[in-house]
Image (cartoon, grey):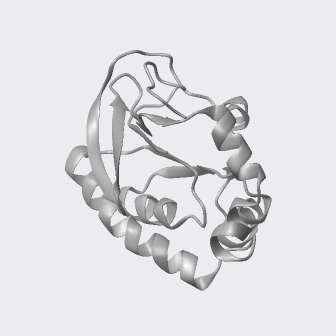
C-alpha cells in the first residue's frame, strides 16, 4: 500500500513541493523536495511496513541472485546516475553534504561527491552492501536514517538527500 507523505522525515517541515516525475518501466515515480532542508523523496511511497517486509525478504538475492554487489548492478547504477545527476545539476547549484538513502553500491554518492566536492554518506539496509561501501569505497554508510541522524549533526546547509 502506498502512502502520501505530508511532512519531511528529517526536519518535520510540511513545506514540500514537486521535484520531478521519473518514468521507470510502466510506473511513474513522483519525487518531492522539502524546501526547508533539501530532502528529496518519493511520494507517494510504500508504507514502512511494506518496505521493511520487502527488504527483510532477501531483496538483493531476489533481484540479483546474491547479497553482494555485482558488475551488472554497478553498471546499472552508473547508467541511472547519469540521469539523476542531470536532474540534480539542473535544480541544485551547491551541495555541502549529500545523503543517499537506499544507496546500494554507491555510484550516485561517488558521482555527487566528485561533482560537488561535498561530504557524502549513505543509508543502505543490506549488510553486505554496507560492508562493501565502508571497506571497498570508504563511504560512511548506515542501516537506517535514525542511525545516521544519531551519528551526525544536522547543522549544515545545502543538503541534497536522495531516496
Q: Answer above or below: position of 161 versus 104.
A: above
Q: Which residue shows up at 70% across the image and 73% down it?
A: 136
Q: Is residue 142 left or right of residue 26?
A: right
Q: Answer above or below: position of 53 versus 59.
A: above
Q: Which residue shows up at 65% across the image and 75% down it?
A: 64
Camera-side residue of 86 and 44: 44
Which image quadrant is residue 105 in? bottom right
Residue that sits furthest to the bottom in the current view: 71
Q: Locate the N terminus by quadrant.
A: top right
Q: Position of residue 66 (x, y in %)?
A: 74, 75
Q: Position of residue 20 (x, y in %)?
A: 27, 44
Q: Which residue shows up at 54% across the image and 25% down it?
A: 9
Q: Position of residue 161 (x, y in %)?
A: 46, 42
Q: Is residue 4 left or right of residue 67?
A: left
Q: Position of residue 67 (x, y in %)?
A: 75, 70
Q: Which residue shows up at 39% across the image and 74% down it?
A: 79
Amino acid at each position: 500500500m502506498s502512502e502520501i507523505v505530508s511532512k519531511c522525515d528529517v526536519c518535520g517541515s510540511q513545506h514540500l513541493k514537486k521535484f520531478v516525475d521519473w518514468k521507470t518501466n510502466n510506473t511513474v515515480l513522483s519525487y518531492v523536495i522539502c524546501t526547508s532542508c533539501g530532502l528529496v523523496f518519493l511520494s507517494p511511497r510504500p508504507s514502512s511496513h511494506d518496505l521493511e517486509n520487502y527488504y527483510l525478504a532477501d531483496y538483493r538475492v531476489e533481484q540479483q541472485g546474491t547479497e553482494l554487489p555485482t558488475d551488472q548492478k554497478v553498471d546499472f547504477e552508473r547508467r541511472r546516475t547519469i540521469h539523476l545527476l542531470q536532474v540534480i545539476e539542473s535544480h541544485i547549484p551547491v551541495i555541502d553534504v549529500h545523503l543517499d538513502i537506499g544507496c546500494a553500491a554507491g555510484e550516485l554518492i561517488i558521482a555527487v561527491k566528485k561533482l560537488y566536492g561535498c561530504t557524502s554518506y549513505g543509508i543502505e539496509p543490506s549488510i553486505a552492501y554496507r560492508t562493501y561501501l565502508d571497506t571497498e569505497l570508504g563511504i560512511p554508510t548506515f542501516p537506517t536514517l535514525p542511525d545516521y541522524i544519531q551519528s551526525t549533526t544536522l547543522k549544515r546547509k545545502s543538503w541534497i538527500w536522495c531516496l
